[in-house]
Amino acid sequence: MKYNPLGNTGLEVSAIGLGCEHLDGAEQKAVDSVIGAALESGVNIMDVFMPGEDIRAKIATALGGKRKDVYLQGHIGSCDVNQQYDISRDLPTVKRYFEALLRNFGYIDLGMMFFIDSEDDYKGVFETGFADYVLSLKEKGDIRHIGFSSHNPKTAIKAINTGLPEMMMFSINPVFDIFPSERYVLADTNEGIDVSDFTQLDPIRAQLYKLCESKQIGITVMKTLGAGKFLSAEHSPFDKPLTPNQCIHYALTRPAVASVLLGAKSPEEIKLDAEYFNATDEEKDYTKAIASMKDFRGSCVYCNHCLPCPSEIDIAAVNKYLDIARLDTDNVPPSIRSHYAALGHHGGECISCGSCESRCPFGVPIIENMKTACEAFGE
Ligand code: SF4
Ligand code: SF4
């Protein structure tokens, strides 16, 4: 394992960290084995954004006496009051969830202001008592450093310029860097893409990276593998799927990046991630693959940041089953049909309120997808 300074926090974090989201719903034994494998391979930073008491408690149990050997990212404003992942800026709710997290782990190394993407998110954090609460947590020692998570470079820049955050968790991969909302490279040809120096990186993202470098705001990375899509021949926006080594290398070589946080469901996946350190330069090189990129915006990465849904639809799950169904509409696997049927709520229950679309950082046409899923699966 290699360790990098996390901006000017004074922390040295493992270049590969663990995003614990995939452990949600797992048995204690499985959580123990993944956390154990991560610790064994030298991982010392873990993200616990999940609001559920059950998974938080299982992670705390799995860490046991090793709690002090890891830096935990805990998110302030992550909740599940409607039994779905949600963002809250309501202080009593925010406090209730974060204080429960503190009871699980004693203290939180990196107190993350959760999901600052939109102007409303910004206002909800910096123009209310939210930021003061975060500062008070630091003053009491309940959190050791203040961070935030975001997918939006413009808002992230504004948040950093307040002077409050010391670090940031941001979604980074070659697709998001080159095809952001304000893209300016060609979508359907490679003409004009200079892969040798990435001068066509989205200018706002470039500005964000520069700001992080200059202010020493360390970055931890989410969405490194595009929810696994870049690795799949069917879903990759490239002519050939990328490899995990290429994706990890891309993220780790961005300015200010200290650690990529990868999800894992098994100890084997942790070992596979650690293989990055044995890869050759050729195996890590992503430049040629990127030259073949097709348009990716509008494609779901199954992050569920669009929740909550008033119809309680698990939007990521519906999109996931729909994506699989779309691969061969005449032969949808029965297992996918039954997984879809087992969901508590279905695409057909969408009332087209549009609140999810305004929250989706990736421009997914969710309302249209819900209708298509209803047509494909009959409910
Ligand atoms: S629709 Fe958007 S926010 Fe929702 S799961 Fe997909 S990518 Fe994430
Ligand atoms: S548009 Fe449909 S899927 Fe989206 S939040 Fe509203 S009801 Fe839910």
Image (cartoon, helix red, strand yellow):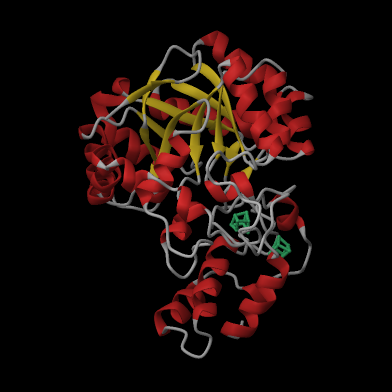
Question: In the rendering, at what x and y percent does residue 353 appear?
Answer: 79, 62
Q: Quadrant of the N terminus?
A: top left
Frontmost residue, 196 versus 368? 196
Outermost residue to the top: 139
Quarter of the rendered structure image containing ligand 1: bottom right
Frontmost residue, 191 versus 40? 191
Q: Is residue 28 left or right of residue 168?
A: left
Q: Residue at x 46, y 25 (%)?
A: 102
Q: Residue at x 57, y 18 (%)?
A: 166
Image quarter for residue 275? top left
Q: Quadrant of the C terminus?
A: bottom right
- Residue 49 visible from this viewpoint: no
Question: In the rendering, at what x and y percent does residue 245 appear?
Answer: 35, 46
- Residue 99 visible from this viewpoint: yes
Image quarter for residue 107? top left
Question: In the rendering, at what x and y percent does residue 222 appear?
Answer: 50, 41
Frontmost residue, 44 versus 63? 44
Height in image: 191 above or below 270?
A: below
